[in-house]
Image (cartoon, grey):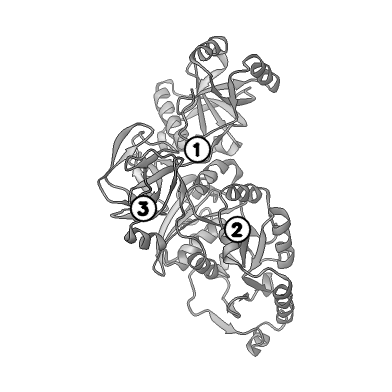
Amino acid sequence: MADPEINPEFQRQVATRRTFAIISHPDAGKTTLTEKLLLFGGAIQEAGAVKARRATRHATSDWLEIEKQRGISVSSSVMQFEYEGQTINLLDTPGHQDFSEDTYRVLTAVDAAVMVIDAAKGVEAQTIKLLEVCRMRDTPIITFVNKLDREVRGPLEILAEVEDTLKIDCAPVTWPIGMGKTFRGVFHLLTDRLMRFTPGQSRYDKSAELIQGLDNPRLDELCPGEIDTLREEVELIRAAGSPFDEELFLAGMQTPVFFGSGINNFGVQEVLQALIDWAPPPQPRDGGARDVQPAESPFTGFVFKIQANMDPKHRDRIAFLRICSGRYRPGMKVRHLRMERELRIGNAQTFMANTRVRTEEAFAGDIIGIHNHGQLQIGDTLTDGERLAFKGIPYFAPELFCSARPKDPFKAKQLAKGLKQLGEEGAVQVFTTELGRLLLGAVGQLQFEIVAHRLSGEYNVDAVYDPSDIYTARWLSFPDEATRKAFFQREAAAVAKDVDGNPVYLASSKYNLALTEERWEHVGFRTTREHGEVLA
């Protein structure tokens, strides 16, 4: 078929969208930066107390009860707000490595990312993994070096480590003046002015002083101990550093670097402005059969996240859909390609963390929430009818396993239902053996703790979690039906099904896995599978 025509009105709307994720290693300050971007964008009036676990205020993006108790992010949040005529779709992701799959899924739905680095610790393990995922899609990256209000490593050392470890060219845009108790603000290298702020404020101070020019005598008056060092470093990086190149940034080859302190509002405004000025609007997407242009008229989108119980009172389940083209209107009908059926989207919503409003209109780049009664799964593609399949991030074979059984035998169905829903949203992988035994698979131990907490709080089910002797899991694919039947007969005790009904082999040891693969040389033993993929 011919490529659909570009709609001029949609093209104007798409140009005003910015959809990005914030990524980092745990405790680098990602959720704090999220709060401050919302604050500077006018979406909230006062930032939440991210670390004060007993405080009455919590981070807007940490809405799960366990996130408020522990002061960590374990679930991705979506927040939309307007800023300078642009519609901002901000996705906060879990920093903890045990929830990396949730972060990988989110990164398929964005057009850019902000990478937060702790100036004391530098580049950390999870940052490396997340940047590798971004690099798979050439996602443009803006870097924010955080916590300059503390005694940290020098900015030149941080830049060198980012370039050496992450293999990406750094282009400093702002530069810190001092650090710790002598931190005075940030100097903007492109506009040649210093932005001076007052520490310890949770509200945005619009009266912050701006000082033009590096030779301004006011600088010698305000920061006599730091100004000479600043002038030397600025001269050095202007002579030897890489100037910002927007084309290299959009290609994912260069990252503009901003320094500051999220908790004290230093440098946050500049990151937000960079997202408006430089981050790309929604880009074309690989739909399998063809590239989908964001401004074309036919509606397309894909589900990248499912969240159960955002409103515990109503036991709801929301499917998060990234719109790739066209326009959403209430009551519109779309084609659910996996189920080969028509689906009516009657009451889609947009989000400020867990606060939701009915949306009357949405375009490419926007994230909408669809009430889900089990018909939508991660990876599902919705279109006006055209057969497309947007590529997603795969499930990975779990590294840890345990079995689950209810303390109260009469709540077995509740446990199964809760685990099914949590499995569908990606909180944990759930396998059911041929004998009906429920097994949980996870990347890290913390996933099990979160699932137990949510089952108790959201589903009123207390369970017993027994360690399992399973070494690993492999998804199975068969060349024909006869092989499938023979395998199931011989290996029945080690076969299970995942939450989507796909067959899985549960190996008790590395030796057991190798032996089985050798015995069944024509059977596929896969370490990953695509979301929404149905295996033979």
Distance between the alpha carbons at the discs numbered 1 and 2: 24 Å
Distance between the alpha carbons at the discs numbered 1 and 3: 34 Å
**Numbered mark located on residue 427 in the image:** 1
284 left or right of 121 in image: left
Residue 390: where, in percent of width, then height? Answer: 45, 42
- Image height of 255 relative to 469, above or below: below
Rate crowding at label 3 as few (under 14), some (14 to 19) or many (20 or more) other CA atoms within 10 Å. Answer: many
Where's the N terminus, which quadrant?
top left
Question: Quick check: can you spot residue 34?
Answer: yes
Q: Amino acid at mark 3?
A: Glu
Residue 477: where, in percent of width, then height? Answer: 54, 23
Q: Mark 2 — residue?
A: 116
Q: Mark 3 — residue?
A: 296
Rate crowding at label 2 as few (under 14), some (14 to 19) or many (20 or more) other CA atoms within 10 Å. Answer: many
359 left or right of 126 in image: left
Q: Are marks 1 and 2 in contact (CB under 8 Å)?
A: no
Label 1 vs 3, first from the N-terminus? 3
SS for callout 3: loop
Mark 1 or 2, which is nearer the eye? 2
Q: Amino acid at mark 1?
A: Ala
Q: Residue at x 58, y 70 (%)?
A: 266
Q: Amino acid at mark 2?
A: Val
